[in-house]
Amino acid sequence: MNATWTVRIERLETQLPVGIYAHEQDAQPVWVSLTATGEASAAPGSLDECFDYEPLCRWLTQVWPATPHTPLLETRVNQVMAFVFAADPRVHKVWVGLYKQRVSQQALAVGMERAASRTEFEALRLSAVDTAAMLQTLTQEGESHASLAQ
């Protein structure tokens, strides 16, 4: 028998190169909060029957910070969601919050949050893939027409 389980991480600090300003090209402290909800054994007897949060924490603090600079927190939120959904097919909903700590003297942190089901996230991803393929086709057709015109 399965039950609904939620993994919750609150204010895990990592270092990310993210932001639109020149000084944000270098990594800065960012808090990550998230919940990942899905179905797993109601009475697990081993770790493989559970949602294992340790690989997620390791990815957030060791692997992800080494990725190239990204201007938008929204892109970073989507990267976390993609990782969580890919890591365990039993997860059906993810909520992610990313917060910069050095944005405002009046606020402890400022950031972005997003929630999505696996179905919603996949639909967006497939739409993006379709759009990219269409743009590539149009570009190739434009190049073909341009070479014929010469």
Image (cartoon, grey):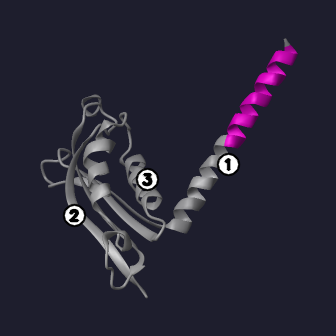
From this view, report whether residue 39 is shown above or below residue 97: below
Q: Label 2, label 3: how many angstroms apart (C-alpha)?
A: 17 Å
Mark identifier at residue 10: 2
Q: Label 1, label 3: how many angstroms apart (C-alpha)?
A: 18 Å
Residue of label 3: 78
* Apparent side of residue 85 relative to residue 52 in the rendered image (left or right): right
| Amino acid at dot 2 | Glu
Residue drawn at (56%, 60%) of the image: 122
Secondary structure of residue under mark 3 = helix
Q: Nearer the viewer, residue 2 or 74?
A: 2
Residue drawn at (27%, 51%) of the image: 58
Secondary structure of residue under mark 1 = helix
Secondary structure of residue under mark 2 = strand
Q: Bounds of the magenta span? A: 133-149
Identify the main secondary structure in magenta: helix
**Residue 143 on the magenta span:** yes
Residue of label 1: 130
Q: Quadrant of residue 11?
A: bottom left
Mark identifier at residue 3: none
Of the image marks 2 and 3, the number of the one nearer the N terminus: 2
Q: Position of residue 129 (x, y in %)?
A: 63, 47
Q: Which quadrant: the N terminus?
A: bottom left
